[in-house]
Amino acid sequence: METDIDQATIQVANIDLVADTNKVTMMALTNPLILDQIFRSLDPISLRSVRLVCRLWADVGASFLGKQGHLIFLSSSDYYCTSPYFTMPRELASFNPKLAKNVTLYINYNCNINCKCAPNTTNLPSTFATVLPSICEKLETLRFLSGRAFEPRLHEMWTTYDFPNLTHITIIATNKEFNQHDGDMAFPNIQQFRPLGNLKVLCLTNFLLGERNPSESDWSSACQGLLNAAPNLEEFTLNSVFYPDLSPCPKLKEFNFQYKECRDYVTKEIIKLDISEMNRMMERCPNSLEKLTLNLNPNEDAIEPTEKLNFRFPNLTYLKLDTADIFKIQDSLNVTNLPKLTHFSINTCNYLDLSKMMANYYMHHTGITSLNVVCAYCAEVGNQDRHAAAKLVTLFPAVKEYSLELQIDLAGDDVAFLSLRAMMQSFGGWELTRGQVNIQYKWIPLSLAALNLHNESDTEVVIAVMEGMSDWRALPNTTLQFVGNHGEPYLHLTDRMRDALLSCRTIKSVTISEFGIDEDTWEDMNAFIEDNNLPVSIPNIDGFW
């Protein structure tokens, strides 16, 4: 009897326990805080599924789906359309403006080699015009990847609809936009774009593959139309062959300009960089400009311009010249023209030597505190580079952060190594808070004799650099890295190497990588480094021995 009662009691208790558990589970599954933590880890596909369970789950999941989900429109039969990673239909899906907080629209015309599209096919979905009104108010980012951004079927988008929240536009064009079989399909006459009052970032890239097509003028007109419609633009990147008028953008803060020299489609003559046109463009830059990057991608047969650049930007703080040996800045780089300039970056074309680059600079600038230099060192002009390094320190005496990337082209003798050491010593006068030196080897042996010569000189290069840096005032704040060429330069542990390592023992760090080194030498060097507590790292790369 007692056993039956006890058993009944247990059953009742189990029922109550199950009931309590179900109740707790239901409370958990309807607690927005708990759901918030669960839904946060779900992917968009799972979120769409769980939102079908009940209204509460739909409401909680909607915010996460809006943040994570993407409405993907694939506009051509290219690789991405057939890739298993993209399962969205090529037709533009219906759009619920209440669900999404913002929209990014990608239009990609980059068909693959097996594409069956007709030459004049636009590949826009038939529902594009229907869905576009719903997208307009939510659209924040618009990107055309290899796309005909101004083709006739998109004419209405630019001239009719307002995009109050559009902040970013990226357009990447290729020769496909200018193919002759496209005829007049590529560029309709867009007289005026609708105002783009909130557009902050505009990126325009035109890869002409070496030839300038007559339709380029239509491209430049359309791009200028976008600039004219964006009075609040803050960042503009242009990779093309025309010089825009930037006066319609009085709030522009950052301008990145790359001019790609090419041949005229008809005459086959090189369309060289026109410094007078660049100066005109610069003169119309607003005084709001804070960051400027200029880069010339020269044609191999191009002639370097002789006219100098003129800079007058009262608020510019950052200037980067990626072809500094070609741009003739001369006396324009001074405190009067650029009173707020603090960051200056100079890079030579194809790693030319420092002396050629520094020939373009005459004036002191005491406001520059951050300097980045990318150049080469060649034994043939080593003595000239030594004087150029001293000139660099003299012209910019207030540098506190210095980054040097130096490519070594050296099959050396004692004179060359002495010049390299003297060049590195010249940089030691700055009171740096941060220094970074990267030494890269240009390694192209032409014969067995050249191979042996380089093998003997590789260690000498490392020694010359470290000896030159040993007296730097800011050595404790400086990092040094040597990068070989997948084991081609060969490293030896000589007495001078030991002395050089000890002379830089106060440096923040030294890394010697991608060098060839036999196993015994590698072990001896690491033992020497450990015994002397040196901040030196020599990574062991498989295949070196």
Image (cartoon, rainbow, N blue to C red):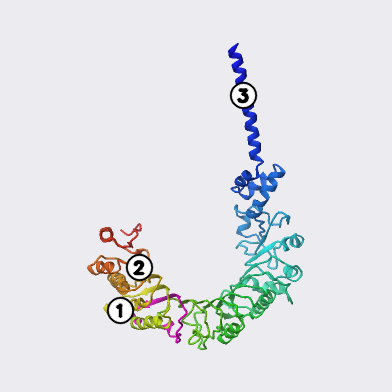
User: Residue 153: where, in percent of width, then height?
Assistant: 74, 68
Q: CA distance from mark 3 to mark 2?
A: 72 Å
Label 3: which secondary element: helix
Marking on residue 220: none
24 relative to 137 in the view: left or right: left
Q: Which residues are magenta?
A: 356-381
Q: Tell me the quarter of the picture where residue 191 sits.
A: bottom right
Q: Quadrant of the C terminus?
A: bottom left
| Residue neighbourhood size for the residue with mark 1, other residues' Cα within 10 Å, grouped as few (<14), some (14–19), many (≥20) | many
Label 2: which secondary element: helix
**Labels 3, 1: front one:** 3
Q: Quadrant of the N terminus?
A: top right
Q: Is residue 382 above or below residue 3?
A: below
Nearer the N terminus, badge 1 or badge 2?
1
Q: Tell me the quarter of the picture where residue 511 sits.
A: bottom left
Which one is nearer the viewer's eye here, 455 or 27? 27
- Amino acid type of the residue tagged 1 in the rendering: Ala
Marking on residue 416: 1
Q: Is residue 362 magenta?
A: yes
Residue ID at (71%, 42%): 54
Q: Is residue 5 above or below residue 266?
A: above
Residue ID at (65%, 56%): 70
Q: Is residue 422 magenta?
A: no
- Amino acid type of the residue tagged 3 in the rendering: Ala
- Amino acid type of the residue tagged 2 in the rendering: Pro
User: Residue 331: where, in percent of width, then height?
Assistant: 48, 87
Label 1: which secondary element: helix
Residue bearing the label numbered 2: 476
Point out the residue furthest to the top here: 1
Query: Can residue 230 be seen in the rendering of this structure?
Result: yes
Marking on residue 13: 3
